[in-house]
Amino acid sequence: MKASVPKRIGLLTCGGDCPGLNAVIRAVTKTAINEYDIEVVGFQDGFQGMVENRYVNLTKDYVSGILTQGGTILGTTNHITPFNYPVLEGGKTVFKDRSEQAISNYESLGLEVLLCIGGDGTMTVAKMLEERGLTVAGIPKTIDNDLFGTDRTFGFDSALTTATEAIDKIHTTAQSHHRVMIVEVMGRYAGWLALESSIAGGGDIVLIPEIPFEIDSINETIKERRYDGKRFSILVVGEGAKPKGGELVVQRNVPGSPEPLRLGGIGNKVADMIEQEINVETRVTTLGHLVRGGIPTPADRLLATRFGVEAVYLIAKRKFGRMVALQGQEIVSVPIEEVGGRTRVVPLDSSIIRTARSVGMSLGD
């Protein structure tokens, strides 16, 4: 007997926001309704909304016109999960397991599948919910492009475009003032965003987490450029970069979050080291959350839409516990249990690193 197609599914967006989330919501909703007459329920603010039973019924009219919008119409949170939910007791915040409440809400709504859109933290929570009896599926999202199992995540191309445009603009003031200009970008523990934006923006030095840097190497590159008549240098640094034998620069710690360490500040540290050693005026621009914002690029709209459509196909075939992924040019699926808690870093023998070195870019090693 042929297995039936689920009739009602839940959807949520988790983790940091990025361009393309609305494109996925739209694709899932339209495909579910058009192809299979599946009802779609969208939880608001990620897993927090699931615990608190805050949701909207997604219809074709509800998702009309959101393809080009940045952010997510459902809202998101990157520090609350059903297993570590903040509760105020005695004037203090304590964290408790509220997964049973989330599961109860899922069941009371008559949901048959929970489609989780997010990064490795989201997929980790999805797997934990699956172990508690929920049926889950996943769609990969992150501007960092560091999610295991997929060659690309939507959100990355939009962030890459924003970072590259910033580097383009930094060039003119760097040339005018003969300065070293440092651009710090997000990326967590992977260097995809820093490396690719530096190549695309014509950076002279790029520092990534995968290759610990030495300040002497950086300073030597700057001095060589000045000796050759190039009185400015553009240095792009990923927030997770660190000196050889040194430590990560942590901006703050968020207790209870799946990812408690908030990186940031390495750009200023490098600037201080440059000025102390070679007395060259150095300025820092930290792009921060700027790279998360704005409308999605055409590439991200397309990838997000493909992911959303294929995720519904996966659900209709009852292939649960899997995340859609891009491998080569094809959309495939991988087990969610292989995704959570792992980071896809830049391989040291990759062609993208070879490309950077071949065009004369220093990686600080």
Image: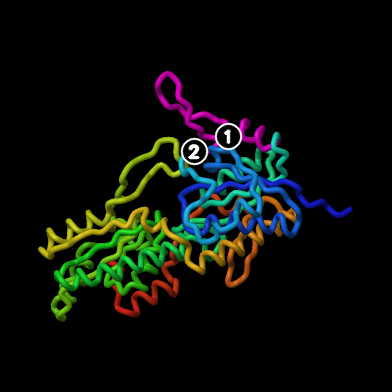
Which mark is on residue 80?
A: 2
Q: Secondary structure at mark 2?
A: loop
Q: Which residues are magenta?
A: 81-107
Whether residue 344 is visible to the viewer of this picture, yes or no, is no
Residue that protrudes farthest toward the top in the picture: 90
Q: Residue at x 76, y 48 (%)?
A: 7
Residue that protrudes farthest toward the right in the picture: 1
What amino acid does circle 2 point to?
Ile
Decide: marks 2, 1 in contact (CB < 8 A)? yes
In the image, 117 versus 53, the foreground residue is 53
Q: Which residue is mark 1?
A: 51
State whether residue 77 is above or below residue 28: above
Asked which colour scheme the image uses, the reply is rainbow
The quadrant in which the C terminus is found is bottom left
CA neighbours of label 1 inside 10 A, class few (<14), some (14 to 19), many (20+): many
- Count up the numbered dots: 2
Q: Residue at x 56, y 36 (%)?
A: 82
Q: Residue 76, position in %: x, y? A: 50, 45
What amino acid does circle 1 point to?
Val
- Quadrant in the rendering for residue 28: bottom right
Q: Residue 344, position in %: x, y? A: 48, 59
- Quadrant in the rendering for residue 101: top right
